[in-house]
Image (cartoon, rainbow, N blue to C red):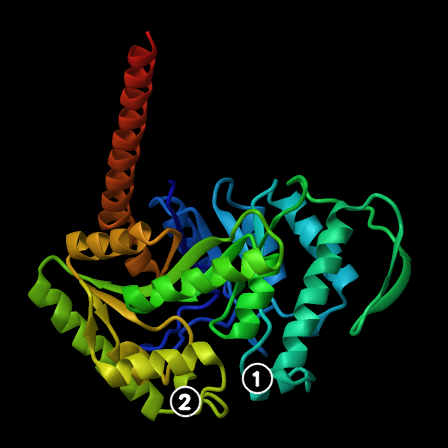
């Protein structure tokens, strides 16, 4: 089973630990960071979405026109544009990138953040809208005949697009969340289902729920699973843990200074995923081989925030534990975007890929041996 690595396409150099020194969209920094990923073994990068942040589709188009291999995961909130318009935007970006686009649809787990851009629906209403939205986008990507739509949230007549994606039948759809409503929506619609890094046992439980939701939706396949972490690596275990504690101290300092983690509306998480992270952190700091929760606790469970701490060998082994659960895509980002992307790409990704290749080769050899035994038995 192949394994892929997803990094971050930050458009400025700020993070939970350091104040930004660039513009919010800095062309040179965006390109430098993307090249650091492309040159060090990463498969794709995420253009995230936030109210007031640089528009991610435009930033992704800038990058796609300058790099030839790196794939793009574009985050999109359904409340910010009509689905027919969004479908054309995505198809155009898939053309610009020559078929390197996947779209990550965000329902929105925080009322305050959603209301910043005029979205006053309830959480359940948002999930229903997202499912309707994704269905329209998929049809617009694939239908060469005009079609009508009469739904709860959208209504239009006689639409047909004149721009279609390079990828046929369509680009991939990514989705995430840890609530029952999220499992139902993503299980029905997603090609990739995204989870935040949790202990192995809890991750296995979530994967089972995603698969059950896909079956309940009548699917014969299941979404590929992606899990996200904040790796903190160093040459020795001692140095890695020293770095981890410095990182948490810096996050707390930034939060105290009203940095990104301290903005109004993020102190009391509403979404299930963030509440899960806080619950896990309250129950303990260390889990399994290398999972460490104080980074999540320090941000109030904000987004991808649980760390994997240790040497490259320790972190690679921890990632392989998740691979054994069926995780095919590893999302990882550090706190110094460029340096951490390079270090992870140099020291962790090759270890994981080599072990996956070894296992795949062993599996293929075992299957071939079984085939020969079966032939011999029939002779």
Who is closer to the viewer here, 44 or 61?
A: 44
x, y percentage for residue 238? 7, 67
Classify residue 306 as left or right of residue 166.
left
Quarter containing the C terminus: top left
x, y percentage for residue 158? 92, 56
Classify residue 169 as left or right of residue 327.
right
Chain-order first, disc 1 or disc 2 = 1
Residue at mark 1 to residue at mark 2: CA–CA distance: 13 Å
Classify residue 329 as left or right of residue 210.
left
Quarter of the image where one finds residue 196: bottom left
Number of marks in the image?
Answer: 2
Element at label 2: helix
Quarter of the image where one finds residue 120: bottom right
Is residue 235 positioned above or below 221 on the image?
below
Q: Which mark is residue 113?
A: 1
x, y percentage for residue 111? 58, 87
x, y percentage for residue 319? 27, 55
Is residue 303 positioned above or below 38 on the image?
below
Q: Which residue is mark 2?
A: 262
- Determine crowd level at label 1: few under 14, some 14-19, many 20+ residues with C-alpha closer than 10 A: some
* Residue 293 in sight here: yes
Element at label 1: helix
* Residue 302 in sight here: no
């Amino acid at each position: 089973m192949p394994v892929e690595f997803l990094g971050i396409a930050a458009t400025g150099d700020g993070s939970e630990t350091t104040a930004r020194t660039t513009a919010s969209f800095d062309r040179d920094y965006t390109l430098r960071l993307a090249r650091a990923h492309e040159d060090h073994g990463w498969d794709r990068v995420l253009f995230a979405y936030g109210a007031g942040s640089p528009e991610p589709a435009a930033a992704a188009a800038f990058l796609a026109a300058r790099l030839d291999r790196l794939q793009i995961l574009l985050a999109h909130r359904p409340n910010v544009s009509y689905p027919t318009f969004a479908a054309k935007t995505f198809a155009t970006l898939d053309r610009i990138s020559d078929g390197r686009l996947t779209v990550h649809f965000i329902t929105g787990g925080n009322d305050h953040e959603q209301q910043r851009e005029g979205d006053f629906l309830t959480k359940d209403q948002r999930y229903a809208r997202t499912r309707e939205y994704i269905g329209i986008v998929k049809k617009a990507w694939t239908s060469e005949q005009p079609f009508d739509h009469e739904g709860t949230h959208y209504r239009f007549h006689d639409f047909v697009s004149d721009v279609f994606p390079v990828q046929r039948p369509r680009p991939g759809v990514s989705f995430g969340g840890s609530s029952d409503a999220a499992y139902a929506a993503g299980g029905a619609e997603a090609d990739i289902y995204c989870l935040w890094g949790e202990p192995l046992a809890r991750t296995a439980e979530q994967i089972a729920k995603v698969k059950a939701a896909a079956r309940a939706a009548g699917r014969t396949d299941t979404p590929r699973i992606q899990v996200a972490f904040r790796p903190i690596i160093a040459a020795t275990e001692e140095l890695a843990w020293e770095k981890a504690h410095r990182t948490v101290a810096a996050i707390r300092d930034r939060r105290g200074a009203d940095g990104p983690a301290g903005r109004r509306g993020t102190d009391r998480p509403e979404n299930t995923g963030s509440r899960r992270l806080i619950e896990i952190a309250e129950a303990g700091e260390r889990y399994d081989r290398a999972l460490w929760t104080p980074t999540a606790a320090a941000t109030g469970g904000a987004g991808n925030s649980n760390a994997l701490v240790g040497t490259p060998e320790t972190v690679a082994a921890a990632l392989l534990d998740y691979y054994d659960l069926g995780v095919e895509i590893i999302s990882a980002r550090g706190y110094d975007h460029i340096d951490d992307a390079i270090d992870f790409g140099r020291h962790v990704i090759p270890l994981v890929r080599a072990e996956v290749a070894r296992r795949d080769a062993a599996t293929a050899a075992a299957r071939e041996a079984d085939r020969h035994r079966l032939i011999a038995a029939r002779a």
